[in-house]
Image: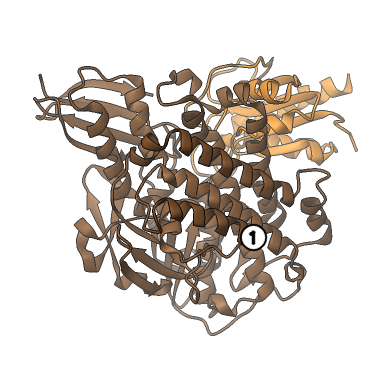
Chain colours: A brown, B orange
């Protein structure tokens, strides 16, 4: 057999433009496989020279899916430039920002499950390509599609009510927020007259967890083994209790067996992380300095967060977390496809948190902005829907940005996704004479489990289309499939 | 106030990319002309949930900038639902939104696509002179139709 190289380009049902290359040797075995990210943006460079107060507004243009995450990570960093640490923000500002954040994670997780992942789960990996999409889900599972749309809408309405727009609105200003919630807005989310209310969101989140648990019961061998591999896991945890924390906490990493590798204050990240580069991708490879490039990489996102936290501080999601953990006898879960399950537990957690915040009078308070002694450097770390997100800014005496560093969730997951691509390529392509559509889809599924946002990760403009190319061991292109 | 009643007008585009802002500018002009802004919706791109949005209206007009040449600078054409699926659910064409609306909500709003020709697409705020001319023609035509 001649050696060959397969390329998947573009990778579908992900945000951004990715390409997969798989090399097959003369014995028909996969010799190497990797995900290239072929967009370039340069956001870190062109933010330089802008006044610091513009940053939370500008950087959210990194993404049309998770702009709120960039807005809030930047806002946390900019707070420090005006002398305000997270604990010094007013309760009203903190709670409004958290409500915005939970609304964002809720809508993003709903979008991923219903629009991107559900076609694979409902129709199977062998389903024809024309069926693996939200239109087929809508045609055959009308009620599920409706719920998906309305759950995403609820999250987006929370975002709109707080920031003025569904995409690229503004809530945070240096040291706080510029507006509070109003009684009329509150009624909209509680009375269920115009949109299903927050209690319905909690009920539907529970229903969709039941769906994934039932799917797991029926397909456990595949779900447990597909793209499974040991890794470190990284996420924010509550500074005191170690609970799941999405807005502000300590950075914690554990290895695949549960040994703690790192537990640091978020603003110390620079002392503990480096970013590797490869010639074949614009996406960097972050790793923990102490453990080196080979052993220091982490998974981030829902699965990693449920592995690193001690518990979930909302009751219904905590019950689900306990069942999730019981499956691996309280050991870390390294099964990639369980990320979907973990994501839905977080969906419920967000719904519960939104309810708690909507019922909190502080969100209608008037103490919105605070100031302290200005500083020259600010670091904001939050858990975006796809994982840990870091923004760092330095300013000069005029308040203009002189340096910016962004490490986004998909960048953290870069090595993990590549491991997934290798693992699935070996299991589905070794010694196979022909590349079939279901084979390519399985490779995409390994990538899709991380819900990567390639545009964010390269900080990209332009189109977002998966290429799979088949190459011989000399690098000559032998076959190509493009979608 | 000129009420659009049960007509929704969706402007698609990005006003920071020169003529890609045509869809939004069209809505700005309608508001200036006194049309009620509740029925004017600004979008960077269409997404699946827009099927829910359009299901609430009898008529929907999508307004977007167009790269290809249009003889009069603009054109308005009826839309039919399409069963094709774009590779990304982060940007869905109007005819697929219409298909989703029919499938999920069993509603069939009368839908049109108003295309206005643009010429420049760089990172800059403001329409080109030629695009402004086309916009003016399109808005005049639209208002005349409303008056009829």
Residue at screen point 62% across, 46% down: A205
Furthest-bottom residue in this view: A373
Q: Is residue A17 visible?
A: no
Query: Left of A60 or right of it: where is A427?
Result: left
Residue at screen point 61% across, 47% down: A167
- Residue behind mark 1: A353
Does B2 sit above or below residue A409?
above
Residue B131 in the image: state x and y as whole percent: 61, 30
Residue A146 in the image: state x and y as whole percent: 67, 33
Q: Quadrant of residue A194?
A: top right
Residue A94 in the image: state x and y as whole percent: 63, 70
Residue A186 in the image: state x and y as whole percent: 79, 57
Of B134 and A211, nearer the camera is A211
Query: Left of B102 or right of it: where is A75?
Result: left
SS for dot 1: helix
Of A202 and A210, nearer the camera is A210
Query: Left of B148 or right of it: where is A206?
Result: left
Furthest-right residue in this view: B1
């Amino acid at each position: 057999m001649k050696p060959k190289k397969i390329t998947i380009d573009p990778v579908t049902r992900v945000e951004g433009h990715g390409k997969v290359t798989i090399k097959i040797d003369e014995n028909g075995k996969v010799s190497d496989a990797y995900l290239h990210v072929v967009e370039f943006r340069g956001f870190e460079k062109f933010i330089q020279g802008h006044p610091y107060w513009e940053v939370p507004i500008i950087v959210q243009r990194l993404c049309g899916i998770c702009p709120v995450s960039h807005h809030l990570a930047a806002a946390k960093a900019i707070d420090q430039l005006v002398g305000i640490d997270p604990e010094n923000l007013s309760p009203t500002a903190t709670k409004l920002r958290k409500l915005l954040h939970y609304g964002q994670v809720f809508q993003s997780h709903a979008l991923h499950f219903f629009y991107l992942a559900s076609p694979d789960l409902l129709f199977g990996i062998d389903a024809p390509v024309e069926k693996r999409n939200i239109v087929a889900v809508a045609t055959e599972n009308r009620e599920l599609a409706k719920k998906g749309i309305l759950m995403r809408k609820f999250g987006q309405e929370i975002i709109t009510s707080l920031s003025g727009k569904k995409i690229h609105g503004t809530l945070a200003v240096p040291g706080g927020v510029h507006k509070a919630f109003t009684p009329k807005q509150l009624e909209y989310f509680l009375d269920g007259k115009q949109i299903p209310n927050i209690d319905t969101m909690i009920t539907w989140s529970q229903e969709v967890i039941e769906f994934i648990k039932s799917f797991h019961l029926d397909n456990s061998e595949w779900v447990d083994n597909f793209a499974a591999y040991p890794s470190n896991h990284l996420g924010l945890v509550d500074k005191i209790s170690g609970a799941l924390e999405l807005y502000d906490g300590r950075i914690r990493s554990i290895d695949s067996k549960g040994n703690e590798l790192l537990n640091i204050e978020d603003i110390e990240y620079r002392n503990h992380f480096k970013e590797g580069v490869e010639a074949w991708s614009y996406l960097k490879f972050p790793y923990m300095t102490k453990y080196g490039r080979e052993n220091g990489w982490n998974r981030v996102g829902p699965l990693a967060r449920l592995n690193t936290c001690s518990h979930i501080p909302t009751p219904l999601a905590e019950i689900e977390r306990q069942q999730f953990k019981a499956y691996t006898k309280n050991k870390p879960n390294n099964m990639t496809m369980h990320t979907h399950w973990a994501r839905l537990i977080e969906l419920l957690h967000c719904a519960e948190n939104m309810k708690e915040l909507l019922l909190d009078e502080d969100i209608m308070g008037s103490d919105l902005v605070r100031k302290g002694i200005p500083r020259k450097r600010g670091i904001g770390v939050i858990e975006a829907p796809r994982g840990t997100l870091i923004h760092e800014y330095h300013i000069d005496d005029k308040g203009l940005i002189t340096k910016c560093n962004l490490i986004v969730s998909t960048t953290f997951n870069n090595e993990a996704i590549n491991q997934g691509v290798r693992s699935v390529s070996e299991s589905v392509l070794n010694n196979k004479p022909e590349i079939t559509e279901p084979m390519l889809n399985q490779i995409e599924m390994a990538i899709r489990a991380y819900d990567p946002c390639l545009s964010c990760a390269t900080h990209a403009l332009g189109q977002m289309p998966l290429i799979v190319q088949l190459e011989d061991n000399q690098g000559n292109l032998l076959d190509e499939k493009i979608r | 106030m000129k009420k659009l009643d049960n007509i929704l007008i969706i402007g698609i585009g990005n006003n920071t990319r020169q003529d890609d802002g045509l869809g939004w500018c069209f809505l700005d002009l309608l508001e200036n002309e006194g049309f009620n802004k509740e029925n004017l919706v600004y979008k960077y791109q269409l997404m699946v949930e827009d099927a829910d949005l359009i299901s609430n209206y009898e008529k929907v007009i999508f307004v977007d900038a167009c790269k290809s040449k249009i003889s009069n600078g603009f054109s308005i054409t009826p839309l039919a639902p399409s069963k094709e699926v774009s590779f990304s659910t982060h940007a869905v064409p109007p005819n697929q939104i219409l298909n989703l609306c029919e499938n999920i909500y069993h509603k069939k709003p009368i839908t049109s696509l108003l295309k206005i020709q643009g010429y420049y697409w760089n990172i800059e705020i403001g329409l080109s002179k030629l695009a402004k001319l086309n916009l003016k023609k399109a808005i005049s035509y639209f208002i005349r139709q409303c008056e009829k």
